[in-house]
Amino acid sequence: MKPAPFDYFAPTTVEQALAHLAEHGDEAKVLAGGQSLVPMMNFRLVTPSVLVDLNSIPDLAYIQPDEDGGLRLGALTRHHQVEVDSLVAARMPLLHEAMPKIGYPQIRRRGTLGGSLCHADPSAELAAVSVALNARFRLRSPRGERWVPAQDFFLGLFTTVLQPDELLVEVALPPLPARTGASFLEVARRRHDFALVGVAALVSLDENGGCRQARMVFLSAGDRPMEAHRAADVLTGHAPTPEAIRAAAEIAASDDIDPSSDIHATAEFRRHLAKVLARRALEQACRRAAEMK
Amino acid sequence: MTKTLIGKRVLRNEDPRLLTGQAQFVDDVEIPGLLHAAFLRSDHAHARLLGLDVSAARQRPGVVAVFTAEDMGADWEPGPPLVSPPPTAKDVLFHSRRQVPLAKDKIRHAGEAIAVVIAENRYIAEDAVEDIIVDLEPLEAVVDLEQALHPGSPLVHDDLDSNLAAHLFQKKGDYEAARKQADLVLQRRIIIDRGAAAAMENRGIVADWDERSQHLTIWDTTQAPIPIRNGTAARLGLSENQVRVIAPFIGGGFGPKMMMFYPEELVIPWAAKKLKRPIKWIEDRRENFYATTQERGQIHDVEIALSRDGHILGLKDIFLHDTGAYDPYGLTIPLNTQCHAMGGYDIKNFTTEVSVVFTNKTLVTPVRGAGRPQGIYVIERLLDAASKELGIDPVEIRRRNLIPADAFPYEHGIIDQAFSPLILDSGNYWPVMQKALEMIGYEKFIRDEQPRLRQDGRYVGIGITPFIESTGVGPYEGARVTVEASGKIFVATGVGTQGQGHFTTFAQVVAEQLGVAVSDVRIVSGDTAEFHWGTGTFASRGAVVAGNAIHAAAVIVRRKVLELASKQLDTPEDELELEGGRVRVADIPNRSISLAELANLANPLRGAVEPGTEPGLEATAYFGPRYGATAFGAHAMILEIDPETMMIEIKRYVTVEDCGTVLNPLILEGQIHGGVSFGIGNAYYEKLHFDENGQLLNASFADYLIPSATEMPRIEVGHVETRSPLNELGTKGVGEAGTIPVPALFAQAIENALADRELEILESPLSPNRLYELLSRKEAG
Amino acid sequence: MPKLFDLALTVNGTRFEQAVEPRTLLSDFLRHDLGLTGTHVACEHGVCGACTVLLDGEPVRSCLVFAVQAHGHSVTTVEGLGSIEQLHPVQEAFRQAHGVQCGFCTPGILTTVVAFLDDNPDPSEEEIREALSGNLCRCTGYQHIVDAVQLAAKNIKTAHQQPAR
């Protein structure tokens, strides 16, 4: 399974990379970690005639604290860096919990944050987590820069708002509100397979233990990360009792997602799993929030 | 003589090379001027091949040749039949249809080879494959086994009037009469679906025709180098000694590498001879899913007749067997199924009928288990159903029916895969099962732990599955053992090796006889230039058949050594010992002579020898069992299931195996562990998904799920040893034992875990999705 | 004619320079251009791990890296870990624990384990299985491999504790 031929560029600045992309448009593909792109090229499912390799561009991989308590991550940061980073563990427990679920250990050494997000596989953990965290993506093109919120970035299966001559360069994660508990759960056939269904949940509690805000974003439950708006409405502003959580989970599964069937799971089974995971994730997020001051 | 090496955990001779990346596999072979092949394969499962345009491919720079069926001319012919139907069976119908080198007129399965490109490297070859224009008329695909037999179904082979490839009826006793006496008759329909062997090494072949010496050397990932040599020579009009086939280190066999001749084995040597250039073809993983054989697909309609106290009076098993697009492997798999459907139980009345069906899918030939898992699944599911109906404990109902120790050899009378009447040579079944029950703490779990766990809301189940395994079948194998001038021992045998440790177990057998270190015995297996009589590694027979041939040859060499040493040391043979590479006089350690000296004395350069003397200290011997030895085992498992997500966790896994004399316990454990992981894959993770057009939907490791280290439990291996009377070493095979009972065990343990749902599982493989469907259906009533 | 790239890299401590096509996979470059056939190819889509090598010390799938991407970098393959005369402690442990059957997955596991034990010298069984989850083996059922890693960890720790002479 050998890839088709291509011309190869290894720019050393973002500007150079953008110039290549501008010149070759749809003929070109961006190569970051290659853990999703190269298998598809080896299968000849995609046959770009130009590959623009970003790995020689310095300063695109970093994890830095923001003064407001959030984080900024460079697009070329490898999954492994994020997985072992203590700032991420401290400030973004949801992200920290999701990282070990991404592929296999060797995949995480090479795969990148930006690569995963731009590939826009609805089974990707990072896509769902970035939406749940209200991430903002900084995109650069020859025309300048723009910021796009995560929930507007994903348009559908393997499709984002990125223009052919545009690169994702940074992900900004705002700080979590006080007393917010996180839970990331997924069900996969083998430990590291693509999730049959997964959920990223955040619950913020007020001083009385009531739910100030709830948020759930599902992966493998539609053609993009699926945010459970109706389920959130059920919980937000109410006490997070077992009945309320159960009701939220039911609505999430029936109304907020649009899973499809494949050889591993039917849409019906995915809905069932989504309901189960939603309930468990909300319970866990509430427990964790309650433990905070 | 004390047995010091048989049964010892000797470290493997071959490991340093494998561990340092110095072992040669087929793709490691490099020859000056080597060309590379890639095949154009069909996207359609069933189609008429109307035309091929290879002109653009031929013109691509770097392409040396492109061959189609037409280009092969008179050399194009289907592969030879590998296994004929049993000549000893009475009611057998068999239509032999074999795979072709390159498709001509018709395509019969997705992935069937249509043309081959030979180029400077594989990258260019794949580019050129895409240049080929194929004109096809797609036909409706035959996929479902039952629909395949309906009149009016499309035909896989147009010259036949149906898709029935074969039919075999066998019986023992009189089932209908037994049924009339029964207190309980149960009927069930059991469906088992396909899986792949998925060895880590894909197939490959390198063919090097030397025009000047008129000699063809082939490196092949085959489990059967000798038949490959003989068949290739015949087909190319060469003498057998003009062809040398080498099966070097092989990265896992598991059955499909025993199949021959694959289309690539028909094409690549032919092309190499035609072009007078060496050619290499290495299968990639996607090809492996289409072009390497698979197995397991069967549909069983079964019936069991029992008395009130749980004794099996009779069994009836009518089943369909999916053979795929061709049937070169005869009836081996369904015969194994028939012979294992009675398990290790004393069943006096048995009727069985198999209809083998052609479908537009990849060929079916044995994959680790080779029809045995399906037979065991049938009987074990029936016993579990009977145990519930009759209110008899599932362990007890098995105990009542197991063949007792004094009943061996036990004759079943029906024909087995080696064409002989099925006889279970030896065994001690109930103690094996008891040991498994003890090791897993069966009674304590059922009585104390399980109720406690249920109260905590946890769904944990237990299962126990006994099984038999036919092993060590003939026809024969051979070996040559030689004491070299250095005093080291050289052994040549015909069976190949694919990881089972033959380099070490065979060396132990020889070292035992000749008193040398195991590391001083060099084994060459799988090179027809070294040894050219034998069949191959299959049906768990390597250690038994080749091992016994090696033993026999070593015994002769030992006798020659002692005879010569006796003369040299002027001492009677019965006062001599072999140890540390020397022959010593017992109790007089400084009177000895080395094997090296003896070897040199046995091969003098000058002087006269007595008439009739054979030079050297060497012997060739053959071994062919009268029939295959039957091993027995029992697996037990404690499994927890999350009743909401259907995800499982295996808490404990116990196996007890009786495979007769154990040559090397370390290697035996490895075989069991690997077999169980294969079985767990079969049971809960692996399934080949074909759609209604015969397209394989999961032709990659991303979607065909073989267990990884995080899915596998620790396996506790227990052992019982009942020597087989069928060979000198007393050994039975064990290569497939780990795999055979696992799907049945899973069904039982999951039913037990979800006992309150009263689920009955009659299919394999399972998955979380499938369990959810079965449970939902049950709840819907 | 495809445009070739002048590749320069270090493999097992030796520098190599060669012109290669950009699409040449690192796995193929190592095996066929450099003749280092210890690294094996089993799936070419990044799942099985047989092709794992160390790229600047990190375990990566060489079937998912183009050789040109290793330009200016350092690669370690199984041949760089030890030799028949002098096995690496991890290789020796695999021998002792019978962690090898057919040997096809083994090189990818060895490089993975060497890097893993570097990061995590005292792992639990759960951590070991997690670290191995990206390496498929069809022969062993993983048990003796896990035993081998535990043995290697123990031996390496003991070796480090020996006082220097």
Image: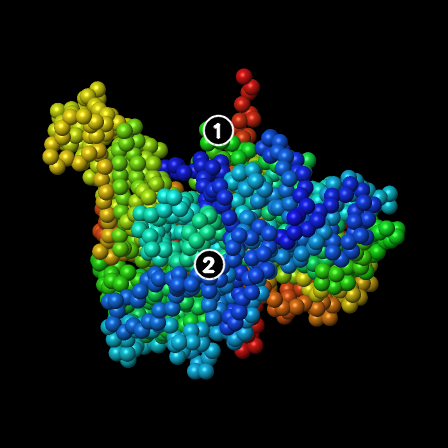
Identify the residue at horizontal 79%, vertical 47% (top origin).
Answer: A17
Q: For marks 2 and 1, give the CA distance.
A: 38 Å
Q: Name the amino acid, label 1.
A: Gln
The residue that disc 2 covers is B292
Q: Is residue A187 visible?
A: yes
The residue that disc 1 covers is C86
Residue at the far right: name it.
A144
Identify the residue at horizontal 46%, vertical 68% (top origin).
Answer: B104
Q: Position of residue C59 (x, y in %)?
A: 61, 41
Q: Position of residue B775 (x, y in %)?
A: 54, 70
Estimate how packed mark 1 is, as few (under 14), some (14 to 19) or many (20 or more) residues with alpha carbons within 10 Å.
few
- Pointer 1 chain: C
Determine whether B150 is above or below B352 in the image.
below
Q: Name the amino acid, label 2.
A: Thr
* B157 and B473: which is toward the camera: B157
- Pointer 2 chain: B
Do dots 2 and 1 share one subunit? no
